[in-house]
Image: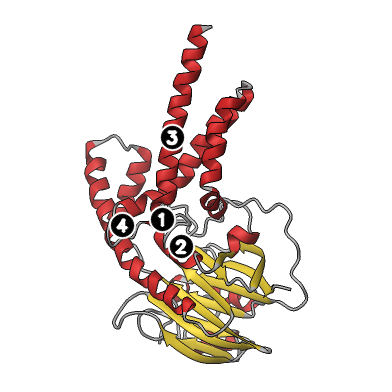
């Protein structure tokens, strides 16, 4: 009997330790990477700690130890918003009302190298057939040579969108809309390779503020990605340990660059004179991160609100994270948000949803 109690208490202490680590990781999103670049990266590990504590919860329930089961249950309650952002379980998802908009955000990765086979490009075909009302695109780069995909090809395919804004300089982004784009405001520093654009869009009787984001990329080389794969396969080797130091330093430096970009977006949202606000794009960070936290203080994550599952949007080199987001203001409700993994021609999957005014 005594041995059994000792074992349960020992396992309980280990569980308490992992709960503390999970909470530390969950609330690391509130730490600015400009102050602590490396600490800001631990949010990437949140799914691991959540799964470990889910395992503890299942263990205590199976052996009917309700008192100990309260430990992971309370831990989950304390980081409920992070869990919902990382893995929402919206089992019952209602259809949007008749008056709605369909949104699409997609990092098109230069249309897979401006590929044009028999006059067709699969990413461009996807956009054409999406039936979205407003599309925000990142890494929008086309060729000037007719044997590759050109701006003329894109405009011809997307003729259903009479209103557009295409940035021909860094950051390379575009917005195609079925509704008039009244103004365009850059939200990035001059000569910046990443940032955001704010569009005022007249949708019926309402004017929307739509922000297209492409926050700082991690700029990982082939060698960096190979190191990451080595970390996953054999993290104990000396070579990998050195690679981890270099890898985390590089990620931390770019996380510090994303922070002021996210703050600039948050400032534009706070200062908007329009009640209906949408921000979408490639945040280049996980749902448990400073950019996501800063922007979601004013907007709701559409995937957390109406999506299901992990919603992984970046899918190469074993970097399986949801980096792409659609966020909506408090006057709007999202419906059926989905990361569409049926097209894999870019390193990102598109994310899409329906939005309508709250009644």
Mark 1 or mark 4: name the one nearer the start of the chain.
1
Name the residue that disc number 2 marks: 292
Q: Which of marks 4 and 3 is in front?
A: 3
Q: In this view, does 96 lie to the left or right of 11?
A: right
Residue 187 rendering spot, x and y as whole percentages: 39, 81
Disc 1 to disc 4, C-alpha distance: 15 Å
Label pair 3/2, CB-CB below 8 angstroms: no
SS category of the residue bearing label 3: helix
Colour setting: secondary structure
SS category of the residue bearing label 1: helix
Name the residue that disc number 3 marks: 18
Residue 270 vertical placement versus 27 (above, below):
below
The residue at the point 46 percent across, 40 percent down is 49
The residue at the point 64 percent across, 80 percent down is 133
Q: Nearer the viewer, mark 4 or mark 2?
A: 2
Mark 4 or mark 3: name the one nearer the start of the chain.
3
- The image's mark for residue 29 is 1
> Which quadrant of the figure contains the C terminus?
bottom right
Mark 1 or mark 2: name the one nearer the start of the chain.
1
Disc 3 to disc 1, C-alpha distance: 18 Å
Rendering quarter of residue 22: top left
Name the residue that disc number 4 marks: 251
Label pair 1/2, CB-CB below 8 angstroms: yes
Residue 248 rendering spot, x and y as whole percentages: 28, 51
- The image's mark for residue 44 is none
Disc 4 to disc 2, C-alpha distance: 16 Å
SS category of the residue bearing label 4: helix
């Amino acid at each position: 009997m005594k041995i059994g109690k000792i074992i349960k208490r020992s396992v309980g202490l280990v569980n308490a330790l992992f709960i503390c680590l999970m909470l530390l990781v969950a609330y690391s999103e509130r730490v600015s990477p400009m102050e602590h670049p490396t600490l800001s990266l631990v949010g990437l590990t949140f799914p691991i700690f959540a799964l470990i504590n889910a395992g503890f919860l299942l263990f205590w329930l199976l052996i009917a130890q309700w008192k100990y089961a309260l430990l992971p249950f309370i831990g989950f309650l304390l980081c409920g918003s992070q869990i919902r952002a990382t893995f929402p379980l919206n089992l019952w998802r209602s259809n949007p009302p008749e008056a709605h908009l369909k949104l699409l955000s997609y990092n098109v990765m230069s249309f897979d190298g401006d590929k044009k086979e028999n006059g067709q490009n699969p990413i461009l075909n996807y956009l054409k057939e999406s039936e979205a009302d407003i599309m925000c695109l990142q890494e929008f780069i086309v060729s000037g040579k007719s044997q590759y995909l050109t701006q003329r090809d894109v405009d011809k395919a997307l003729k259903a969108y009479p209103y557009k804004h295409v940035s021909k300089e860094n950051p390379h982004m575009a917005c195609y809309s079925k509704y008039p784009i009244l103004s365009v405001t850059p939200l990035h520093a001059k000569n910046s390779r990443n940032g955001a654009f704010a569009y005022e869009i007249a949708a019926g009787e309402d004017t929307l503020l739509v922000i297209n984001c492409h926050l700082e990329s991690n700029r990982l080389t082939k060698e960096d990605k190979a190191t990451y794969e080595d970390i996953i396969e054999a993290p104990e080797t000396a070579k990998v340990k050195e690679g981890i130091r270099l890898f985390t330093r590089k990620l931390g430096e770019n996380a510090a660059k994303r922070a002021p970009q996210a703050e600039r977006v948050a400032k534009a949202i706070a200062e908007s004179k329009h009640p209906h606000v949408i921000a979408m794009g490639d945040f280049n960070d996980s749902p448990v991160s400073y950019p996501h936290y800063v922007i979601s203080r004013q907007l709701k994550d559409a995937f957390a609100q109406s999506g299901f599952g992990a919603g992984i949007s970046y899918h190469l080199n074993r970097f399986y994270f949801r980096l792409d987001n659609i966020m909506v203001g408090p006057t709007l409700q999202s419906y059926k948000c989905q990361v569409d993994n049926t097209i894999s021609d870019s390193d990102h999957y598109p994310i899409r949803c329906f939005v309508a005014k709250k009644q």
